[in-house]
Image (spheres, coloured by chain):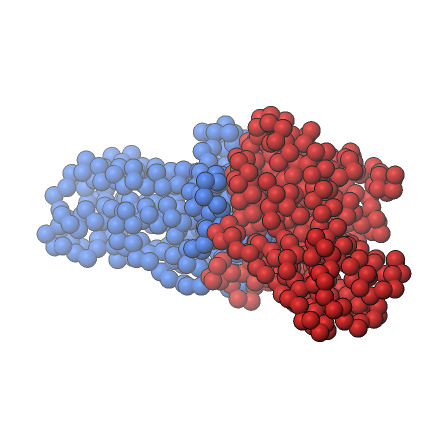
Chain colours: A blue, B red
C-alpha cells in the first residue's frame, strides 16, 4: 500500500498532518511557502525523504504563487503534474526574477531542519535547472516543475527498489525491532526500513514487528504502528527503554531503521535512540540494517562528527499533553538525532544495492561506481 | 533534606501523592486497607523501600481499624508513634483474631506489586511478632505497632548509611546519570541512589546530574528532577532514548540507580531501562553503581531469571494524557522492570558497606557475615 503522504495539487502542497495521527487522518492544503516551512519545522511532514519532497514542492509553490500573481489571467494555479504548465498568459518575468524567487524559497526552507541531508539535496536539485542555461522563462519554469515532480516520482521508485534489495534479510518467523518511522509517511509513500518489511510481506513471509514508541514525539507509537497495522503486519509498541529487555528475552532477531544523513565513512545520523539500539545489537550479536536512498548520503562529510545535530525545544519533553511534567528551572537535553558509528552497522540497503559492513570504507566507491 | 514521603498519623497512612508531582504537592490521608493497596498499585506511593513501609503501615491501619471498631470507647485512632497504643478500653479480642486481621491485610497487599521484594520483606517482618509468643493481645498489638514504626525508622537510618557509604564514588566535576527515582520519594525520605548524591553534596562536592525521564510514568522527569532541584543539585532531564547520545558526547562519568530486588548472584531487577544503561556503561567503560538496602536482597532466589517481572497495563503507553497515541488493535509490551546481570555492576552500595564486583559470588557471605 502506498501512503499519500504528500502531493502537489492545484497550486497547493497537500500533506497528511502527521502530528494528528493516528486519531485523525486529516489532509492539509498548504497554500504558501511559509505554511510549507512551518509544516516541516513542526513535523506535520517529517522523515528525511518526505522532507526533501516537501521542500521541492515548497519551492514550486512559491514560484507558482509568483507567476499566477503576476499573470493578467489570475489563474487558480499553474503547475500540474500532467501538463507541466497549464495554458495561461505567462507574465513578463526575467530569468533573474525566477532565480530570486527560488532562492528566496531555498533560504526559508533550509533553516527548518538541519540534520536530514535530503532537504538540502532536494533544494540543490531544484536549482540545478539553471545549469541547463535555458533562456526562455516559460520553459525554465516548466523545467522547475518537471524537476519537483521527478524528485517525488524517482523517490517512490527508489523506495520500491530498497524494499526489493532488503527483503532478503527478512525470514519467516523473525522478530524485528524498528525505531521512529521510516515508512510511507516518512517518504514518497512506501518507506525505507518499512519498505523492506512491506516487500517481505508481499513475498509471503510472516514475522512480528516491535516498534519503539520513540520519544518525545511518538513517531513509532503513532505512525509506524498505524502504517504496519493498516498493512496487516503484526506490530507491538514498547517504550524506548524496554528495548534492552526485549533483546534479553530473545525477542529481537534484527533491527532495521532509516537514516537522516550518512557520512562518507558510513556513520549514520538517525532519530535519537538509534545509537542505543546499535549498541544493543552489538551486545546481543544481532544485525543492524539501515535502509536509505542514495540521496541520504553526504559524501562531503568525512564522518559523523561533522553531521549537524538538531537540538529541539525542551517543551517537547517538559509537557505531557497540557500537563507540565518537568519542574520549572530544570534543564532539558533534547537532541533530535544521534550518530551511529559505521562499525555497528551490518548493511546499508539502498536502491542501488546493499553495502555490507559499511565501516570498511566502501561508501565512496559504491556511490561512484 | 528528608522528604515526607509517608507517615502513620492519627490512624491514617499519610502519603504525598506522587502521581500529581511535580505540579501539585498534595498529601493523601488513607483511611482503609483498600485505600493503601490502591495507592501502592497505582504508584501514588512507589519505590521499593517506600512500598515496604507503606505495606507495614497498611497492616497496622487494618489492625487499628478493627480494634477501634470493636472497642466500647470508639476512639478516633489507637496506634501512635510516641506511646505505641493510646489509652483506651482494649476490646475482647483473641490472638487468633489479631492474626487473622493481619493475614487479611497481607493477602490484600501482597498482590499489589510483584517485583519489589521490600513489600514481602515488610509483610513478613510484621508477622514476625507472632514468633515472640506474646500471649497478651494488647501487648501483642503494641509489638505490631513497634514493628511498623521500627521498619520506617530503621529504613531512614539505612538510607543515611547508604549515602555515607556511596559518597566516595562521587567526585568534583562529575556528570552523573540516574534512572527512574531512587530518592526520598522512593524510600523513607532520604533515598538510595539519590542519598549518595545528597551526601556528596553535603560534603561540598559539585556535580551535574542527568535524569532519564523514565517512560511510561516519568518518575525521572517528575520526581527525581523535583527532588534534586529542591536540594539545590543541578539537574537536566532527557528522554530515555537520548542516554546513548549522552555517553557518546562524553557527558556520563558514572550511572547510579536503585533496585527493586537483588538475587543471590547479584543480578538486579530495577525499573525498565536499567539494563540498557548497564550495556551502555559497558560499551563506554563507565561504572554502574546500584544503591539498595539489605532488605532489597532476595537470597532465596538464585539469579535474575527467577525474579517475577510485573507486566503493567498497556494503557500507560497507549494514551498521552487523554489522547490515544497507539492505534487500536496494536499490541503493547510494557514490563515494569528489567534484570541487569551482576557482571555489569561495578558495586552495590548498602548500609552495611559496598559489594565490589558483585558478579563474583560474594553476596551471600556479605549478607551473612
Q: Residue at x 24, y 34 (%)?
A: A133
Residue A310 seen in render = yes
Residue farthest to the right? B133
Q: Is residue A166 left or right of residue B279?
A: left
Q: Residue at x 48, y 45 (%)?
A: A327
* Coordinates of residue A170 in the picture (x, y in percent): 63, 53
Residue A342 seen in render = no
* Coordinates of residue B237 in the picture (x, y in percent): 52, 41
* Coordinates of residue A161 in the picture (x, y in percent): 51, 49
Which quadrant would residue A80 be assigned to in this image? bottom left
* Coordinates of residue A71 in the picture (x, y in percent): 13, 50
Number of labelled discs?
0
In depth, the one of B59 and B205 nearer the eye is B59
**Does A155 sit above or below residue B246?**
below
Residue farthest to the left? A72
Q: Residue at x 64, y 34 (%)?
A: B199
Q: Is residue A261 left or right of residue B14?
A: left
**Does B1 sit above or below residue A230?**
above
Amino acid at each position: 500500500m502506498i501512503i499519500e503522504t504528500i502531493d502537489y495539487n492545484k497550486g497547493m502542497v497537500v500533506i497528511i498532518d502527521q502530528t494528528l495521527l493516528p486519531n485523525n487522518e486529516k489532509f492539509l492544503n498548504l497554500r504558501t511557502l511559509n505554511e510549507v516551512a512551518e509544516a516541516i519545522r513542526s513535523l506535520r511532514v517529517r522523515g528525511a525523504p518526505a522532507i526533501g519532497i516537501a521542500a521541492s514542492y515548497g519551492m514550486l509553490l512559491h514560484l507558482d504563487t509568483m507567476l499566477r500573481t503576476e499573470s493578467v489571467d489570475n489563474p487558480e494555479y499553474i503547475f500540474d503534474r500532467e501538463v507541466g504548465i497549464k495554458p495561461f498568459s505567462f507574465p513578463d518575468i526575467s530569468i533573474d526574477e525566477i532565480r530570486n524567487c527560488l532562492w528566496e524559497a531555498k533560504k526559508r526552507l533550509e533553516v527548518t531542519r538541519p540534520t536530514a541531508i535530503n532537504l538540502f539535496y532536494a533544494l540543490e536539485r531544484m536549482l540545478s535547472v539553471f545549469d541547463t542555461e535555458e533562456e526562455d522563462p516559460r520553459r525554465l519554469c516548466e523545467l522547475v516543475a518537471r524537476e519537483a515532480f521527478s524528485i517525488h516520482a524517482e523517490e517512490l521508485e527508489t523506495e520500491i527498489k530498497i524494499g526489493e534489495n532488503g527483503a532478503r534479510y527478512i525470514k519467516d518467523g523473525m522478530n524485528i525491532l524498528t525505531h521512529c518511522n521510516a515508512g510511507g509517511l516518512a517518504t514518497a509513500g512506501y518507506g525505507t526500513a518499512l519498505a523492506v518489511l512491506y516487500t517481505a510481506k508481499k513475498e509471503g513471509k510472516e514475522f512480528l514487528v516491535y516498534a519503539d514508541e520513540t520519544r518525545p514525539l511518538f513517531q513509532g507509537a503513532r505512525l509506524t504502528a498505524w502504517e504496519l497495522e493498516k498493512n496487516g503486519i503484526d506490530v507491538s509498541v514498547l517504550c524506548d527503554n524496554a528495548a534492552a529487555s526485549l533483546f534479553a528475552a530473545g525477542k529481537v532477531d534484527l533491527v532495521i531503521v532509516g537514516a537522516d544523513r550518512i557520512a562518507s565513512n558510513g556513520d549514520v545520523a538517525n532519530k535519537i535512540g538509534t545509537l542505543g539500539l546499535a549498541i544493543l545489537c552489538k551486545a546481543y550479536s544481532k544485525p543492524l540494517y539501515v535502509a536509505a536512498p542514495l540521496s541520504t548520503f553526504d559524501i562531503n562529510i568525512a564522518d559523523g562528527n561533522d553531521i549537524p545535530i538538531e537540538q529541539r525545544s525542551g517543551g517537547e519533553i517538559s509537557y505531557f499533553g497540557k500537563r507540565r511534567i518537568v519542574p520549572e528551572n530544570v534543564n532539558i537535553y533534547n537532541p533530535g538525532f544521534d550518530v551511529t558509528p559505521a562499525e555497528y552497522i551490518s548493511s546499508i540497503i539502498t536502491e542501488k544495492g546493499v553495502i555490507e559492513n559499511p565501516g570498511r570504507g566502501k561508501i565512496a566507491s559504491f556511490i561512484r561506481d
